[in-house]
């Protein structure tokens, strides 16, 4: 079932017992006047980091075709980058949380006092900085548009009820955690799913190694997670949202799999009234078979500072 309850997983910005989990970034609101047609941006952040994307890494693979083109636009400058994003948005016809046409605006064009998510829901304009964090965020609006729209709608609804405030509350924390640090763990094998939930890393990654890509797989979603993986490190840990899929799923082409995940996950996210940090399972990203050369050696998983047993497997 999507969103399985997993002990030991914390909400955004809180240490996770049972797994090493780096802090998760959150969206910011920066003041200025609004416009859906971006003016020449007043501020441009350093572009050098865009050149650091190594498309050979498997975690970037789902975005490579569009990402390489956007990368070149970003290296050419902030205004050119926004033009490229908006051309793709017009062609795709995606919608944000309340049915507005998707577009991208300079961060400086977010009105003073407006919330980030509320502005997206109300106008369709996604405030976008000239940096990798927002680069990966924009890419996910195209990879999983329905999930992104659902996250935006739920965030905007919560803001309408509670306002922005100094704290988000449990549901908004979980929505932010999903947006920033989630992966989609698609599985047709209940034993592998249970191994993930039980922190049984040897069953998942060693004994179950040959089943990866034919009975389970991971799709990247969190844009802060992708930003962290520009410089990968062993302890980099995602929050996995479990999606049960039929066996035939693994015979489908990637585009069909993405469409299926987009529909199923967006539906479950919209309906989940108990969404919290416990809706996720921790997953050390570099443990995924085929994603990191060192994990070919089973001893890679002996590092209990990363592959921790979780509370249910600890001695009493």
Image (cartoon, grey):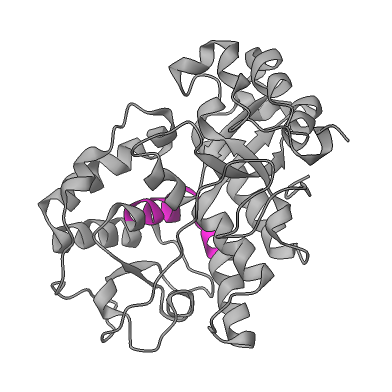
Residue 131 or 80: which is nearer the viewer?
131
Please report the residue visible at 27 percent of the width from the left and 81 percent of the height from the top: 35
Residue drawn at 27 percent across, 56 percent down: 131
State the residue lying farthest toward the front.
316
Identify the image quadrant of the N terminus.
Answer: top right
User: Residue at position x 64%, y 41% from top?
Assistant: 282
Does 186 sit above or below residue 139? above
Give coordinates of residue 241: x percent, y percent. Answer: 66, 46
Residue 218 seen: yes
Q: Position of residue 215 (x, y in %)?
A: 68, 23
Q: Tell me if residue 219 is in the magenta stretch.
A: no
Q: What secondary structure predominates along the stretch shown in magenta?
A: helix
Picture coordinates of residue 95, whole percent (x, y):
47, 66
Q: Is residue 146 visible?
A: no
* Rendered position, 170 above or below 291: below
Residue 307 appears in which quarter of the rendering?
A: top right
Residue 232 location, quadrant: top left
Q: How many marks?
A: 0
Q: Quadrant of the C terminus?
A: top right
The magenta stretch is: 135-149
Of 283 and 316, the residue lying toward us: 316
Q: Is residue 116 above or below residue 178?
A: below
Q: Which residue is nearer to you in this view: 15 or 119?
A: 15
In the image, taking residue 239 as reference, residue 49 lies left or right, namely left
Residue 184: % across, % down: 60, 42
Q: Residue at x 67, y 68 (%)?
A: 171
Q: Nearer the viewer, residue 40 or 199?
A: 199
């Amino acid at each position: 079932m999507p969103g399985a309850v997993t002990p030991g997983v914390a909400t955004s910005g809180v240490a996770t017992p049972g797994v090493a989990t780096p802090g998760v970034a959150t969206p910011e609101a920066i003041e200025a006047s609004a416009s859906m047609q971006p003016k020449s941006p007043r501020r441009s952040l350093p572009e050098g980091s865009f050149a650091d994307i190594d498309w050979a890494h498997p975690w970037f693979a789902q975005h490579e075709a569009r990402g390489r083109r956007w990368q070149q636009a970003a290296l050419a400058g902030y205004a050119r980058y926004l033009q490229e994003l908006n051309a793709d948005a017009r062609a795709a016809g995606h919608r944000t949380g309340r049915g507005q046409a998707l577009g991208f605006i300079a961060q400086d064009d977010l009105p003073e006092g407006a919330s980030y998510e509320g502005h997206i829901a109300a106008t369709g304009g996604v405030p976008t900085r000239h940096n990798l964090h927002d680069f990966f965020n924009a890419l996910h609006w195209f990879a999983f548009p329905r999930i992104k729209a659902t996250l935006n709608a739920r965030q905007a609804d919560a803001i309408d009820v509670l306002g922005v405030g100094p704290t988000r509350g449990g549901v908004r924390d979980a929505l932010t955690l999903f947006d920033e640090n989630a992966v989609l763990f698609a599985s047709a094998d209940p034993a592998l799913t249970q191994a993930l939930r039980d922190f049984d890393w040897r069953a998942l990654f060693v004994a179950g190694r040959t089943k990866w890509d034919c009975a389970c797989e991971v799709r990247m979603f969190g844009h802060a997670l992708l930003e962290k993986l520009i410089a990968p490190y062993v302890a980099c840990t995602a929050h996995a949202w479990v999606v049960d899929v039929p066996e035939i799923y693994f015979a489908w082409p990637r585009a069909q799999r993405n469409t299926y995940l987009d529909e199923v996950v967006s539906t479950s996210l919209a309906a989940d009234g108990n969404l919290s940090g416990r809706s996720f399972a921790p997953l050390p990203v570099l443990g995924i078979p085929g994603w990191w050369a060192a994990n070919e050696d089973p001893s890679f998983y002996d590092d209990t500072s990363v592959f921790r047993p979780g509370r249910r497997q600890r001695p009493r």
